[in-house]
């Protein structure tokens, strides 16, 4: 690293000297604004920054705030510019280089620490309405109705500023006209644009991660929680109708155009986002409550809580759910089967067909020879797993399936049912599992002795 720091300083001195003329260079000026002017970087200086940043990132302690290498390098660029402007990066003997290195490391860690302050992330989402009965808690993640969330939002105007018109919250919900106050009106427009047509928000607080990394982790956890809720609805379509606003979602309304004998035909298809009510709403909320310890365990592991037992197994179940959810959201039946087959493979610990069969037999309490479907013909559990993994996932992903007209609709339907059941049962058993953090644990994870 010392050689790269020496090269960085040399390049900074070269392009920031009074005699340097950018018109003689083939590259475009790159700079950071610092007190008293600008600190310029040549292409070679930026390459040195990248190498130094990667070395620093690879050698950071696991106990310090987390940051991705790309963001660290961006931050290092600003740190280096200010250190150079302050006269703390100078060429000389090894002692001078090491002094500059210490300055860069100390200032960089201070900056990362400041950027890793607790951040509460709010993701607008479409849900089936579970939050209408009150906030839904999934470990450290909370799902709130937009109206309930707005009650908790405070806008700090400053000690000497005029208070914001409080009616802006009601205006966002369409309960009152938009405030005449310009600031409040702009705020209403911004919140309406951010929330869109969503009925809920998913909220999670992240600490110990730099801002961009923090949001990435919060997004993963929030999406994971919505997928858990969709899984407990026991209806694959729920994975389509529930989702975060910023994610890729299927259109709810489509138009098709066709022409026969010169006549234009325009047809349409509209899906509605169903809102649960009555006994169905209560039943799903009860499932969430009953599986609270399992859900909390998985979500805390996703959020890298160091106190969670079996973190690797939690990650495995979470990833299996992710593949299953993506399979349920997939519009192409063949690709959906491949994703669902991957979900079962992940859940079983990468056990392929034999591992998947052992896992589902254990979870369902059935033998591989048991008949599990009778339409269009009787099919054993073993045969079904073979079709999902070998005929479905493997052939599709390995390029052996190329006939786009071959139907996978029936296989997709039974695969969704089997995988959904396996994920729900494994989540239930995981709540009281106290065994080893073994990737193949779901292949033999038994029910509670009291169940």
Image (cartoon, rainbow, N blue to C red):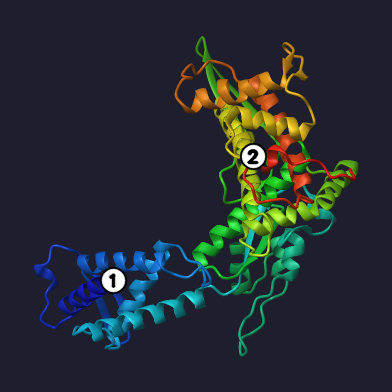
x and y percentages locating residue 426 in the rendered image = 74, 42
- At 37% from the left and 68% from the top, the residue drawn is 74
Disc marking residue 442: none
Secondary structure of the residue carrying numbered label 1? loop
Q: Quadrant of the N terminus?
A: bottom left
- At 56% from the left and 22% from the top, the residue drawn is 390
Image check: 73 left or right of 182?
left
Q: Quadrant of the C terminus?
A: top right
Disc marking residue 1: 1
Which residue is situated farthest in the bottom direction here?
160
Q: Is residue 411 visible?
A: yes
Of residues 448 and 404, the one drawn nearer to the viewer in this rendering:
448
Q: Is residue 265 above or below residue 163?
A: above
Label 2 Cα crowd, 10 Å radius (few <14 / some 14-19 / many 20+):
many
* Residue hosting label 2: 347
- At 44% from the left and 69% from the top, the residue drawn is 60
Number of callouts in the render?
A: 2
- At 65% from the left and 76% from the top, the residue drawn is 155
Query: Which is more N-terminal, label 2 or label 1?
Result: 1
């Amino acid at each position: 690293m010392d050689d790269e720091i020496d090269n960085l300083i040399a390049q900074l001195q070269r392009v920031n000297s009074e005699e340097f003329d950018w018109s003689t260079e083939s590259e475009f000026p790159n700079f950071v604004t610092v007190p008293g002017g600008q600190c310029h970087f040549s292409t070679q200086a930026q390459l040195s920054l990248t190498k130094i940043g990667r070395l620093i990132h690879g050698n950071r302690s696991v106990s310090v705030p987390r940051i991705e290498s790309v963001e660290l390098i961006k931050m290092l660029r600003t740190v280096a510019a200010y250190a150079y402007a302050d006269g703390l990066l100078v060429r000389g003997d090894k002692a001078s280089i090491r002094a500059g290195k210490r300055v860069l490391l100390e200032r960089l860690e201070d900056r990362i620490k400041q950027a890793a302050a607790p951040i509460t992330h709010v993701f607008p989402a479409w849900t089936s309405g579970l939050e209408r009965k009150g906030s839904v808690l999934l470990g450290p993640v909370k799902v709130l109705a937009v109206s309930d969330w707005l009650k908790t939002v405070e806008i700090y105007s400053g000690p000497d500023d005029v208070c914001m018109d409080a009616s802006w919250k009601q205006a966002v919900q369409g309960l009152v006209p938009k405030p005449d106050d310009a600031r409040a009106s702009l705020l209403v427009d911004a919140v309406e644009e951010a929330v869109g047509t969503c009925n809920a928000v998913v909220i999670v607080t992240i600490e110990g991660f730099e801002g961009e990394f923090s949001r990435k982790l919060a997004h993963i956890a929030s999406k994971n929680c919505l997928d858990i809720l969709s899984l407990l609805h026991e209806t694959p379509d729920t994975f389509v109708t529930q989702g975060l606003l910023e994610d890729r979602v299927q259109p709810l309304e489509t138009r098709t155009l066709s022409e026969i004998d010169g006549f234009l035909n325009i047809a349409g298809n509209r899906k509605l986002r169903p809102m649960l009510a009555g006994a169905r709403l209560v039943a799903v909320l009860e499932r969430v409550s009953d599986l609270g310890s399992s859900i909390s365990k998985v979500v805390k592991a996703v959020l890298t809580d160091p106190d969670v037992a079996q973190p690797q197994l939690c990650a495995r179940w979470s990833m299996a759910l992710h593949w299953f959810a993506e399979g349920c959201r997939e519009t192409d039946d063949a690709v959906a089967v491949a994703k669902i087959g991957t979900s079962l493979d992940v859940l079983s610990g990468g056990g392929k067909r034999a591992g998947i069969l052992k896992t589902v037999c254990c979870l369902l309490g059935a033998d591989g020879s048991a008949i599990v479907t009778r339409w269009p013909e009787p099919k054993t559990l073993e045969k079904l797993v073979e079709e999902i993994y070998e005929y479905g996932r493997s052939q599709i992903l390995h390029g052996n399936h190329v006939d786009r007209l071959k139907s996978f609709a029936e296989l997709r339907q039974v695969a969704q049912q089997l995988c959904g059941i396996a994920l729900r049962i494994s989540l239930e058993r995981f709540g009281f599992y106290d065994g080893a953090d073994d990737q193949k644990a779901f292949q033999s994870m038994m029910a509670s002795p009291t169940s």
